[in-house]
Image (cartoon, rainbow, N blue to C red):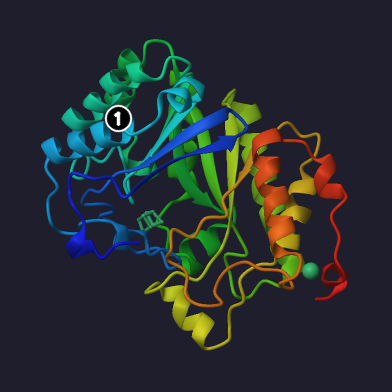
Amino acid sequence: MKDRAAHDPRRPIDHHVQDTPQGRELVLALYTKGCQYRKCSFCALPLLSALDADVSAADIKAQIDAAVDSCPEAERAAVRRVTVFNSGSTVDQRTLPTEALWHLFERLAAFPALAEVCLDTRAEFVEDWELEGIQARLGGRRLTLAIGYETADERIRNGVLNKGLSEETFQKTAELLAAKGVRLKAYVLVKPDAELSETEAVDEAAATLEHLRATGLRLGLEVEAHLNPTYVARGSRLEEEFRAKEYRPPRLWSVVDIILRMEGKGLPIHVGLRTEGLAVKGGTFRNCGRCDERVAAALRAFSGSQDYDPLKGLDCPCRRET
Ligand code: SF4
Ligand SMILES: [Zn+2]
């Protein structure tokens, strides 16, 4: 991560291509004013934004052009999905002007196999008119909104994580998405509360995934879960608990266990193992040190394939330790 003052506002924060259940995905992280909420206890993403400084629509358009133009032709041809972040809410016009968002959709013509666009946002910014405007520009490609739901437990979501998202707002947003034929990608945190043991964290995340699946079925809404093992982000409130030895990030085995609980339930699950360079030393999800790479690679492969079998064959003596 570069120092904010040194960041060129005409370059995106990051762009890379990865495998997902929907195929190759271009991830584009734009440099903007970023999140205006900035209160979630686990989050340091605003550090990747200009905070209170404005980034003009012209600069954001240049970032989009830079990312699209630097994507090699063969890679462009394979991209099925484009996901856009701005360390906040991409449909908050204060941070990502509509003009720049429309420019993004014009540049998507560069991806001939593109089937879906995914936009990251807080739920309260999702508006009827904007969804219609976006869909009109997508020419039949699918739209997904990615929302940080984190957990179905409201005490943890709002009391511990300070997410500021009521179940009622989430459900209303889900209803709007269902009515407009928009997909939902819901972020779910693994071990979001220092009070939870590893076993409780597995139960907690599995219950959240089950709740999301049930919400989708009830509303006729297509739902995908994005499972994020919690890491201790620099400067976040969670860092204090970690330093006081009150919080340990989850084991990778717990992530495996959560996924295995959902086998056969029809909920696509993507595992996010990136820390955006924001984790403090020793503050990431881990196993014993010997099997971490192997288990992380299997989780990444699962994200692309949705094949549960390779996860079942994983083992290490540390799996049985607590
Ligand atoms: S998790 Fe999202 S809403 Fe919360 S502070 Fe971070 S960027 Fe803002
Ligand atoms: Zn191990």
Q: Residue at x 74, y 57 (%)?
A: 294
Quadrant of residue 318 in the image? bottom right
* Quadrant showing the C terminus: bottom right
In this rendering, the answer to whether 109 lies above or below 22 is above
Q: Position of residue 98 (x, y in %)?
A: 20, 31
Tell me: 139 left or right of 251.
Answer: left
Tell me: 115 left or right of 255.
Answer: left
* Quadrant showing the N terminus: bottom left
In this rendering, the answer to whether 37 lies above or below 249 is above
Q: Secondary structure at mark 1?
A: helix
Q: Residue at x 43, y 24 (%)?
A: 76
Q: Residue at x 62, y 65 (%)?
A: 191
Q: Position of residue 142 (x, y in %)?
A: 46, 19
Tell me which amino acid carries mark 1. Answer: Asp
Relative depth, front residue between 199 and 153: 199
User: How many numbered marks are there?
Assistant: 1
* Image quadrant, ligand 1: bottom left
In this rendering, the answer to whether 193 lies above or below 295 is below
Q: Position of residue 151 (x, y in %)?
A: 57, 54
Q: Mark 1 — residue?
A: 69
Q: Position of residue 146 (x, y in %)?
A: 46, 39
In this rendering, the answer to whether 268 lies above or below 220 is below
Relative depth, front residue between 38 and 287: 287
Judge: label 1 CB < 8 Å from ligand 1: no
Residue 234 in sight here: yes
Categorize mark 1 by other alpha carbons within 10 Å: few (<14), some (14-19), many (20+).
few
Quadrant of residue 237 in the image? bottom left
